[in-house]
Image (cartoon, rainbow, N blue to C red):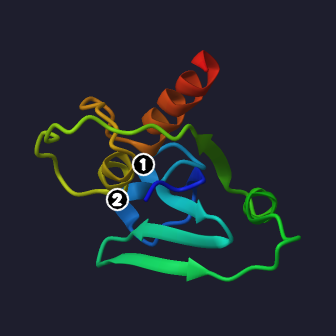
């Protein structure tokens, strides 16, 4: 089942000291999916991946709220990915987001690189 909407959220939030060297505002990323009136978040953390259902009222703007909290939110076009295995890569929030989207972009390693890639992808549409 394909989602109705997909968003990638970029955050400055991190408890890991080694991520402090990444660009401010782009130290972590996760995915939010909407299936009709059901919202799901896939948040790859260092110690586990959280998959959560987000119960919100119909009139509530989840993306607006996230942006008001200082997060960057990019809507991603829904595309059916190729039925071809992705190359092995180290597990990270960026890699989890790329695999959730079925994104074939081997040389994207940081949330900032992913943000720029998705923005350019949206401009082409």
Snapshot quadrant of residue 123: top right
Q: Is residue 92 left or right of residue 44?
A: left
Query: In what quadrant of the picture does the C terminus appear?
Result: top right
Residue at 12 percent across and 39 percent down: it is: 87
Query: If the image is split into quadrants, where does the N terminus sit?
Result: bottom left
* 91, above or below 79, in the image: below
Neighbour class for label 1 at 10 Å: few (<14), some, many (≥20)? few
Viewer-nearest residue: 116 or 57: 57
Q: What is the spatial separation of the Cα atoms under label 2 and label 1, in whole angstroms?
A: 6 Å
Q: Are marks 2 and 1 in contact (CB under 8 Å)?
A: yes
Identify residue for label 1. Answer: 21
* x, y percent for residue 85: 13, 41
Q: Secondary structure at mark 1?
A: helix
Furthest-top residue in this view? 124
Horizontal side of residue 83 vs 56, given as left or right: left
Which numbered tag is attached to residue 119? none
Query: Dot 2 lies on which element?
Result: helix
Q: Which residue is mark 2?
A: 18
Which residue is at the front of the view, 100 or 20?
100
Q: Is residue 60 above or below residue 116?
A: below
- Indicate the quadrant where residue 62 lies: bottom right
**Mark 2, other Cα within 10 Å: few <14 / some 14–19 / many ≥20:** few
Q: Position of residue 80 (x, y in %)?
A: 39, 39
Instruction: Decide which of 25, 108 is in the foreground and name it.
Output: 108
* 96 with respect to 79 (left or right): left
In percent of width and height, residue 84 lies at 16, 37
**Residue drawn where x is 36% and y is 57% of the image:** 93
Residue 2 in percent (x, y) is at 47, 54
Left or right of 101? Residue 88 is: left
């Amino acid at each position: 089942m394909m989602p109705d909407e997909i968003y990638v959220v970029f955050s400055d939030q991190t408890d890991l000291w080694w991520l402090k060297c990444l660009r401010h505002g782009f130290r972590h990323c996760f995915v939010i999916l909407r299936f009709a009136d059901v919202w799901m978040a896939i948040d790859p953390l260092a110690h586990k991946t959280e998959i959560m259902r987000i119960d919100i009222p119909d009139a509530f703007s989840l993306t607006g709220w996230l942006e008001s909290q200082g997060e960057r939110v990019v809507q991603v076009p829904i595309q059916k990915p190729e039925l071809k295995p992705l190359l092995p890569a180290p597990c990270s929030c960026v890699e989890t987001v790329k695999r959730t989207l079925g994104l074939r972009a081997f040389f994207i390693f940081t949330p900032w690189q992913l943000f720029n890639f998705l923005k350019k992808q949206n401009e082409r549409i």
